[in-house]
Amino acid sequence: MEKKSSVRKAVILMGVHFLLLMIVFFSYLIFSYRTAAEDLTTSMENLIQIYGRELGNKIENADMLLERLIYNNADYDQMQSEDESTRYYASVRLKKLVEEQTAYGDYVDAVVIADSMYGIGLDYENNFITYEDKAALRNFVFEGARQWHAKAEWSVDMIGSDRYVYKMYIWQGRAVGVFLSVEQFMKTVQESDLNQMSILLLDHDGRIWGAYGETLSGVETGALLEEGSVSTAGSMERSAGYALGEGRFEVRACAGTSAVFGQIRLNMVLILIVITSLVIYSVLMLKFVRRELLFPVSAMQKTMTSMRDGDYTLRIRDEFKGSEFTLLKETFNKLMDEIVNLRIQSYEKQIDLQETELRCVRLQIRPHFFLNAMATISSLSQRAKNREIQAYIAALSKNIRYMFRSGLHTVALGEEIRHIENYFEMQELNYPNCVFYYIDIPEELEEWRIPQMLIHTVIENEYKYAVAMDQTLTILIRAEERTEKGERMLYLQIEDDGGGYPREVLDSFAGEEAENRGDPEKRAARRSGERIGLRSIRRMLELMYERKDLFEISNIMPHGCRNVFRIPEHPVQEIKEMEEADR
């Protein structure tokens, strides 16, 4: 008997369910949001009127204080008297006047009087103003006094490290200014009374100078307030403003999304009926979905998760009522059996290929060495240096015995260094006094395992490309232990002071195109195996440690080259001597 599709039924029922939910949700959201937005706008208008009048009173009191300080006062003229004592007593009287006028009220945070003719400055500041800001206020008023004449009007500006609302009278080289800190100026009401609203202080250009209340993203001091620049969820068009300081600046109330939703009030009876209906329908639908859809999916997902984590022995054993899940189970189990068999075959082939490639790379290095050795013997023979040939062949035999231990892919660092010292002695017969070498290997690192012939291949390239009969080449070999990302590494450097690597070799080694790639001679040189030793040991490191960042070459200033190896403590792939012998 053919089983019916439970997935199709579940999809149709879930579609109807979510359609009903969306209709109810959006109807409720639109109605509630509109009502809440209107209520919020009314609240903002009422708040800004009260808040604005309070700030206006502060401005008015500061204006009155400023008028009392300058109205019909001859002491300002006497401050510019040629008689020093007259100027002194006039300053004392003005200082006393400032203290008297500010003693019984906190209308302003600072009062500064400055005379640019004789550099006289008098000031009063609240305790919270720092010494640096006091000096900044003085300098600001003195700069105004030097203008000689200027229009007195309310402004807002950054002075020192704080922002101030201020008004300053300037006449005949004198200046008197009153200053109100923006932060203190806007703290007229308790922040909790704002009901998630924010008050912004704007100048006549619409530039933001202060904010109080709810923090709004996009508010930056000194930035222009533009539509959409503040995240208020569209409430900026319903914000209310209040002009201050003869229209020179204003305070504006605005609110974010949370404030709008905070005003929402619903018809609870209607919503309860709708929600109850949806809950009953949802319960019935979810029972069906759970039985026909969620349970089969959950069972299959559990099995698939275990397989993904590496347990390929598991199969889907549950019985399902729907035809779709039954077909999926049978097909999936069959495919998993085939995949497991294919993976086993693929792994076996990959292991064989990787071991074969590793052997080929090592065999590629040995002919490179033997060809160089034969060329050296031929050169000595042509110069009739029979004694040197005998010594060279004796040293060469030691190197050959070392190289033919083909099963050991890693050797102790100390053993490789002893082989290198023997190689230097062998090459000294062919290049007398042409190479000075220095080896700096800490004793505790001599047992660190490194790939066999690693250092030898680099030194062999030094003799092939850098050593010349008419000059002495210095070679430095040094090693140290480092920790990279929690892993112990042998940091091995081989440097010389020769001519360095050609640019095309560096580019080719780094996997980039050489600058003169189109040159036929250079392409032919690359095809012929130039620097094959370097490429071979890089490939050997990739196979043995399964990493591509263990070997780097570069040139150093003013001349020379550097070869850097970073050898982990243990290789990932290594063919042992017994395995090599069995083959």
Image (spheres, grey):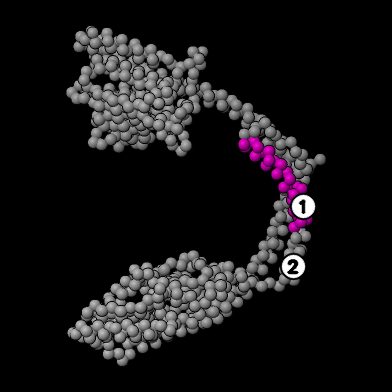
Tell me which corner region of the image, top left, top right, bottom left or bottom right, holds residue 86.
bottom left
Please say if 226 is above or below 322.
below
Q: Dot 2: what SS?
A: helix
Q: Dot 1: what SS?
A: helix
Q: Residue at x 47, y 37 (%)?
A: 486
**Pick the front one: 564 or 466:** 564
Question: Mark 2 — residue?
Answer: 272
**Quarter that holds the N terminus:** top right
Please say if 514 is above or below 534.
below
Please say if 363 is above or below 42.
above
Crowd class of label 1 (few under 14; some 14 to 19; many from 20; radius 10 Å): few
Q: Main secondary structure of the magenta part?
A: helix
**Pick the front one: 74 or 395:** 74
Q: Residue at x 49, y 27 (%)?
A: 572
Q: Residue at x 53, y 24 (%)?
A: 351
In x, y percent, where is residue 239? 52, 76
Q: Residue at x 58, y 75 (%)?
A: 40
Q: What amino acid does circle 1 point to?
A: Lys
In x, y percent, where is residue 279? 75, 60
Indicate which disc residue 287 carries: 1
Magenta includes 471?
no
Mark closest to the chain's N terminus, 2 or 1: 2
Magenta includes 293?
yes
In x, y percent, where is residue 37? 59, 74
Left or right of residue 319: residue 306: left
